[in-house]
Amino acid sequence: VLINAAGVARPVAEFDEETYLNVIDINLNSVMRCSMAARELLKAAHGSIVNFASMLSYIADPIVPAYGASKTGVIGLTRHLAHAFGPEGIRVNAVAPGYHKTNMTKPLWSEPIDAERIASRTALKRWGTVDDLVGICLFLASPAAEYITGADIVVDGGYVSGTT
């Protein structure tokens, strides 16, 4: 199993070309590099790749254009690799997390007003935790998902499906 979970965001700074390209390189190009590096091992094991996209592949955030573009690109790359690697017995899927309490989102969840605004928009009325992502990754990597490839699954507590 290969889990491509790299992700950085540089709010506002992503409008600078160098920062934009750096975010794209980390969030998107690394997925291709790691997938190609692991391809032969995964082929021998009929393995699985789980790529991390983002709910910002589905909705816009005006201060992170490179993050949104790169994570949208991860979904596209996931689909293409699913077809390229599928004949070799490798499944490739993506998980698109919403707002989860991580170091990257700490500036939001550590501010009570921002934290409540985000939690109240989810159907579950709470932030996600890293543990909320474990089950879907285990499922996609397991034989229970052996006929699933090229899929992207949003894990956001209902944020994207709701209204503001």
Image: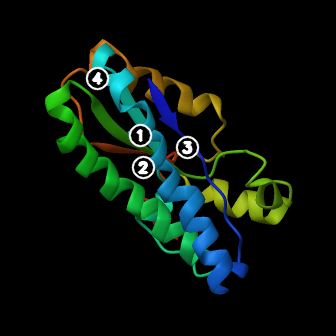
Residue to which mark 2 is pinned: 32
Side of 87 where 143 appears, left or right = right
The amino acid pointed to by label 1 is Ser
Q: What is the C-alpha distance between the residues marked 4 and 1? A: 11 Å
Residue to which mark 4 is pinned: 43
Q: What is the C-alpha distance between the residues marked 3 and 2? A: 34 Å
The percent coordinates of residue 2 (x first, y second) are: 46, 29
Label 4 CA crowd tier, 10 Å (few <14, some 14–19, many 20+): some
Task: Answer above or below: position of 92 versus 31.
Answer: above
Labelled pair 2, 1 in contact (Cβ < 8 Å): yes
Give the position of the N terminus as an image quadrant.
Answer: top left
* Residue at image point 55% right, 43% down: 124
Q: Earlier in the sequence, mark 3 or mark 1?
A: 1
Which corner quadrant of the image does residue 92 belong to? top left
Task: Answer above or below: position of 95 versus 139.
Answer: below
The percent coordinates of residue 160 (x first, y second) are: 45, 59
Residue to which mark 1 is pinned: 35
Q: Could one spot residue 161 in this view of the protein?
A: no
Q: What is the C-alpha distance between the residues marked 3 and 1? A: 34 Å
Q: Which numbered mark, 4 or 3, is in the foreground of this view? A: 4
- Judging from the image, what secondary structure is the residue with disc 3 in? loop
The amino acid pointed to by label 3 is Leu
The percent coordinates of residue 29 (x first, y second) are: 48, 57
Q: Earlier in the sequence, mark 4 or mark 3?
A: 4
Residue to which mark 3 is pinned: 124
The amino acid pointed to by label 2 is Met
* Residue at image point 75% right, 57% down: 115
Residue nearest the viewer, comparing 50 with 106:
50
Task: Answer above or below: position of 103 versus 46.
Answer: below
Q: Earlier in the sequence, mark 3 or mark 2?
A: 2
The amino acid pointed to by label 4 is Lys
